[in-house]
Image (cartoon, grey):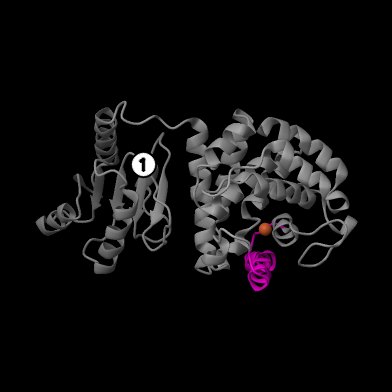
Amino acid sequence: MLILTDRAKGGLAIYDFLTRGRRCQVVPLHQAQAQPLKHPIIVCDVDIGNMTSVRLLRAALKLHRVDADIPVLFLTRDSSHLTAALAVSLDATELVYCNDRPAAIHAAAERLISAYQSRNKGATRPASVTEARASDAKSALASCFDAVKRGEPVSTAELDRGASVILGAIKQAKIRSWLDVVWQFDDVTYQHCLLVAGLVAAFSLKWVLASDHQHLLLQAALLHDVGKARIPPHILNKSGPLSKPEMDLMRTHAELGHAMLAGQHGISPVILDVVRHHHEYLDGSGYPDRLQGRQIKDYVRMVTICDIYAALIERRPYKAPMPPQQALAVLTDLGAKLDRNLLKSFEAVVADSG
Ligand SMILES: [Fe+2]
């Protein structure tokens, strides 16, 4: 269920009731969204007397109502004919009044979802559990990147959710299933971050890290490239090699990401360390601080291995993923730059990814 709202602070208590037992995303209208979020119903809790809200709602519906058959349920804030007419003009499938009994609102939503799903039975392949989790993790990641683009703090709740979803997915399915799903994502940065996070999850499970460390490391892996939210898209998405000035600019993402998160209350030093230092090498040839050996923590070394491996196996329209063993050979050729023992342990993840 997708809830679009212009209410501050996450909306109404009734949302909890409305979404019982369903995966739900509450999207504030003022948050710019780049990717459509497909759900079997869109619930609009918007002041349709407010022209700005109406304008934002039109844009959001255009993006997220990927199938014209998806029902749109309006929670109206008054029961006037004018409000009803406005909602209908915005393509409302049905209207319910916010102050109606929660059970009646819930029932209306369930009825619309059920009707939509029975109309579409067999028309589309149901999403696998891994697909649903990858989609969920991507939305959590997108929310963090969107916040950074706006110069706002990342939501630690979203970050926490993303990490839990990925750990759950990798515990339940092999890393290969996760890669198969994430390779379908077009956005270069999101695909990369979700590949890295999946690999880190698989690695941490092989390495038998304590669960709270796993969770924190997953959050760090998700956010490791958050500084790229401030890198121009034409550089991020360039299909050919970067020029020297472009490469220099790209390399600022580690410091940029660190600076943005360091100013936010509640971000763990582990996350800050990974964000700033995931491009450091043990021989001191990395960036931005040219750290060496013991200055680089084990958990940063793990993310670095996963980061390089993910970059090699990424799928692009113009590039097939490098086969696992070939990618492992590239990592091995980096010699003293990477932790030899960790790389040996990573071989088990590589074996599962093929
Ligand atoms: Fe990076």
Rendered-image quarter of ligand 1: bottom right
In the displayed orientation, state which residue is furthest to the bottom. 245
Q: Amino acid at mark 1?
A: His
Left or right position of 249 against 335: left
Residue 164 is a magenta residue: no
Quarter of the picture containing the N terminus is: top left
Left or right, 293 with reference to 24? right
Dominant SS of magenta comes to helix
Quadrant in which the C terminus appears: top right
Determine whether the residue tagged by mark 1 lies in a helix, strand or loop. loop
In the image, 333: left or right of 166? right
Who is closer to the viewer here, 101 or 26? 26
Residue 267 on image: x %, y %: 66, 59
* Residue 175 vs residue 137, the one in the foreground: 175
Residue positioned 52% across, 50% down in the render: 140
Q: Which residues are magenta?
A: 242-268
In the image, farthest residue toward the left: 81
Residue occupying the point 11% across, 59% down = 82
**Residue 256 part of the magenta-drawn span:** yes
Q: Nearer the viewer, residue 96 or 57?
A: 57
Q: Position of residue 182 (x, y in %)?
A: 54, 42
The image quarter containing residue 144 is: bottom right
Residue occupied by mark 1: 39
Residue at far top of view: 122
For image coordinates 69% across by 64% down, the residue present is: 254
